[in-house]
Each structure stands twice: as structure tokens, then as C-alpha cells.
Amino acid sequence: MCSFTEAKCFFRSQILLAEKDIQTLPKRKFSCGERKKSRKPVIHRNLCGKIQIPALGLGTWSAKGGEVEAAIEAALEAGYRHIDTATAYENEKIIGEVLQRWLSSNKLKREDLFVVTKLPPYGNRPEGVNKYLRRSLRNLQLDYVDLYLVHVPFAFKDIEEGGSYPHTADGSIDLDMTTDHVAVWKAMEEALSAGLTRAIGVSNYSVSQIERILANCTVPPQNLQIELHAYFQQNHLVNYCNKNNIQVTAYSPLGSPGLSKLYTKENGPQTSLLENSTVKALAKKYGKSPAQVLLRHLIQKGLIVIPKSVTPKRIKENFDVFDFELDEEDMEKMNSLDQGCVARILNFRNFFKGVEKHPEFSME
């Protein structure tokens, strides 16, 4: 547990490290994310100044079955140690099987890994935290996770294990309108105290929602996970988190090329980030791929990135971003690509009919 004063001190030291792009950290008895015999040093971030999280991890949203199994194997072979999943992704069991193979064969020690999972929207109530976190631990075959996040600020009615999302007769998502962020956060703090997770945070929350937690918490959120990419840089939210010692993880850091069909005249730029002329020109300049330039840009801004891929070649390529650095002029070029909220890709309205009726629904 850290106080706000301690957190601010740690944050100042963290910024100095980030500015100097320090890529190696002293060995710790209980450190996570460090790779044995790594040929390329990996940048880490501090959670509350004492827990190290690799600045690059593997996202696994929408990856299931043999696809996610092969992806995790390829990622671990490539050097990834930060794995991001969620109860809602329905792939924790398979991920757990792969991790257990690596652990039982002594390829890795538990402390080498940094595993993130999330409280699902149908468990977003105080009693759901312990229930769903323990279920995740069983599925992942772990005694603890390294970071547990509240996946979304809104809540659905609960479901039976293995069941589908709850819906009303007209096909709308069946909402639980009683969401209490402060009460849920107290349960998150209890999970932390119980040793079920090493750190806690939130995902897809707005500034006002985070402020409510900060005003009523013992342990402040240590991480915020949000959609963030060069077209949608969320500078206001990132700056707020920086001031409050909350590390930011960017999901969809490549602009979710698999969801490019969601780009319309009313919803963001027509050109995908991987085809953007500025990105392609910088890729040519540095001898890197467009994806590597996009990831390096966010890493140099002090963010954590979790690109999702199930292609072994791309998984390996995405990890190869620690041997070059964008110069100041090129960072400004990348920063100028920001289009604001119009470039948001993952609008929950597109996935859950009627979710905007929930009092905590926000697309800030």
C-alpha cells in the first residue's frame, strides 16, 4: 500500500527514468516481467513505485481456442512476459494451460510473468470481485494475478458460469443500474490485501469516475487501461493519470486493423494507421514496420501497450521495438496524427444494445 505522497515521489522518479529511456532495472526478489537471458532489454513501468510491469504485452481480446494457445506460445518464445486477458474474453483456461506448461517445465518461474485479467461487467458489484477473481485464478491455474482491473464502469445482471451475456426480451443488454464504484473498489482493495492480486486498477473509466474512487479509497488505482492509438491519443485522460501516478495501458495501439470496418465518415479517419503516409514514411526511415513505429511512439510517451495478434510473425515483430528510438521531430509528427474522439473505434454501443442507458456509461 502506498500513500499519495509516496506515490507522487515515485512518479517523479519514474518520469526521470522514462525520459532517459532506461531499459534495465535492478533484480528484485519478487519482480515480474523480466526475461532471463534476454537479448534486448525491455522497458518497464512502475506501479505505485514498487511493482514492475513490462511496457509491452500481448493483448488477447477475441482470441480463443487453438488460436490463442498458439499466440501465447509464440509470444513467450519471442520474449513477452506481460499477458493481458479478461473473464469476458473467455480464453483464460487456455491461457492458463499454456502458462502451466511453461511453469511446470521450468522454462519460466512465476515471478517472470506479469498476468493481467479483469472483473467482467456481469460481476461489477462488491460481491462479484472475490467470486470472479477466484474463478479467474482457477482458470489461469495461478495463485495470484499481477494486476486485476475493473473492466468497465457499467454493470450487467449476473450470469451462470459458462452462460452468455444477459439480455432483455427486446434484445437489449440487461443492465444492473445499482453500480457503486466506491463499494466495488473497496472489494478490490480487499482482494489486494488477501494476496489474490499484486496491483489493482480500472479500465475504460472517465476522469470523473476515477476522481470518485480517489476521493474514497485507501489504495488508489495503479493502472488505467483504455483504447489509445496515434489517431486517438486521449491526452487529457493521460495527463490526468500522470498527475495522479496512474500508469496508462493502451489497448488497440495499432488502431485495431481487424475492426477497420467500423471506420466511417462519422467514425474516424478513412486510412488505417498501418497505411498512414506519415507512419509508413517513418517506418522506411528507421527500417522498421509501421506497427513497430506505432508501438514505439506510445512507449516513448511513457505508456504501456498491449497489441493483439495471433500471427507468430507479427507477434515477434511487435516485440522488436526496443532497439530504436524516434527522434523529437518524428515524435511530434506522430503526435500530430491525433484526431480526438472521432477516431474512437471500440464504442460499447456497437456491442451491447442499450448500454448507454446505464448511469455510469461514459464515452469521455
Image: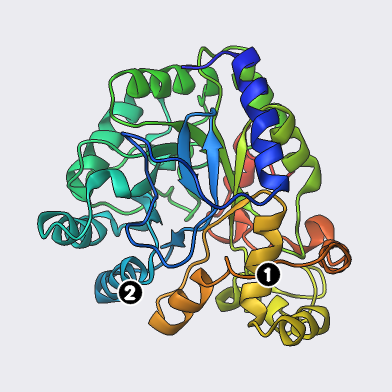
Residue 262, given in percent of the width and then of the height, sits at 66, 73
**Residue at mark 1 to residue at mark 2: CA–CA distance:** 21 Å
Residue 260 drawn above or below residue 86:
below
Mark 2 secondary-structure assignment? helix
Residue at mark 1: 294
Which residue lies at the image location 37% right of the left edge and 36% below the top edge? 28
Name the amino acid type tagged 1. Answer: Leu
Query: Pointer 2: residues within 10 angstroms few (<14), some, or many (20+)?
Result: some
- Relative placement, left or right, of 277 versus 36 is right
| Image quadrant in which you'd find residue 341 | bottom right
Residue 5, given in percent of the width and then of the height, sits at 65, 13
Which residue lies at the image location 82% right of the left edge and 84% below the top edge? 277
- Relative placement, left or right, of 190 versus 323 is left
Circle count: 2
Residue 52 drawn above or below residue 301:
above
Q: What colour scheme has been applied to the protein in the rendered image?
A: rainbow
Residue at mark 2: 74
Name the amino acid type tagged 2. Answer: Ala
- In this view, the residue in front, 197 or 124, is 197
Query: Pointer 1: residues within 10 angstroms few (<14), some, or many (20+)?
Result: many
Q: Are marks 1 and 2 in contact (CB under 8 Å)?
A: no
- Relative placement, left or right, of 256 versus 143 is right
- Relative placement, left or right, of 312 versus 307 is left
Which residue lies at the image location 59% right of the left edge and 37% below the top edge? 358
Residue 8 drawn above or below residue 97:
above
